[in-house]
Image (tube, grey):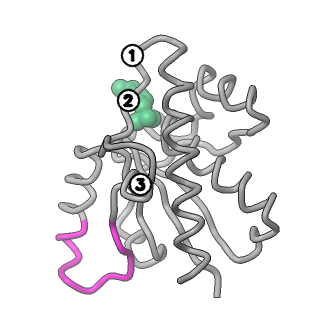
Amino acid sequence: MKQRILFVCLGNICRSPAAEAILLHKLEKLQLIDQFDVDSAGTGNWHVGKLADPRMRAAASNRGISIKSRGRQISLDDFNKFDLILTMDNNNLKLVLSLAKELGISFKAKIKPLLSYSTQTDLVEVPDPYYGGDKGFDQVLDLLEVAIDGLIQDIKVH
Ligand code: 4NP
């Protein structure tokens, strides 16, 4: 059975679609893509149906990574569809946990901050790059790449 992984941020146009594209890119290289379903969503609904932020798409494209997904908002169905829900910051985590409460105790997904898989940072949050300069997008991609390497190590052994 496929492992299903959902990345969650606020708008679903910067951090979580980048995380989704990085994981897909790395799984493809490792020829593991068939074993996973990967998706992303936002806690907010402002960017539903939109492509990711052009600044994030450009920064990812410089690394050979193509971000193709369109914005969508997390829904209660996701908690039973996905095995793992990985949040970008404390606000996302809080919101996702409070949504999960609506389902009571029985749902499938484990909910964790993505950076808990990183071996190279003490940060617990992926900073929101939306209101910053171009450099912020590259910093986010650096953080995501290391954390996703850690995630892949973990999901390969479990
Ligand atoms: P994201 O970044 O949560 O990484 O997608 C943001 C995108 C849009 C907004 C905030 C954060 N916004 O306020 O529209």
Ligand 1, image quadrant it occupies: top left
Residue 131, x across and y down, in percent: 39, 16
SS at badge 2? loop
The residue under label 3 is which amino acid type? Answer: Leu
The residue under label 2 is which amino acid type? Answer: Asp
Q: Which residue is mark 2?
A: 128
Task: Left or right? Give the position of 110 relative to 100.
Answer: right
Task: Examine the rendered structure and indicate whether residue 103 appears above or below residue 151.
Answer: below
Q: Which residue is mark 1?
A: 131
Look at the image and give the residue range highlighted in magenta.
100-111
Residue 36 image-quadrant placement: bottom right
Mark closer to the chain start, 3 or 2: 3
The residue under label 1 is which amino acid type? Answer: Tyr
Q: Residue at x 64, y 88 (%)?
A: 1
Circle 1 crowding by C-alpha within 10 Å: few under 14, some 14–19, many from 20: few
Residue 81, x across and y down, in percent: 48, 76
The answer as to whether callout 1 falls within 8 Å of ligand 1 is yes
Mark closer to the chain start, 3 or 1: 3
Between the C-alphas of marks 3 and 1, the distance is 21 Å
Task: Left or right? Give the position of 36 relative to 91.
Answer: right
Q: Residue at x 61, y 62 (%)?
A: 38
Between the C-alphas of marks 1 and 2, the distance is 8 Å
Q: Which residue is mark 3?
A: 114
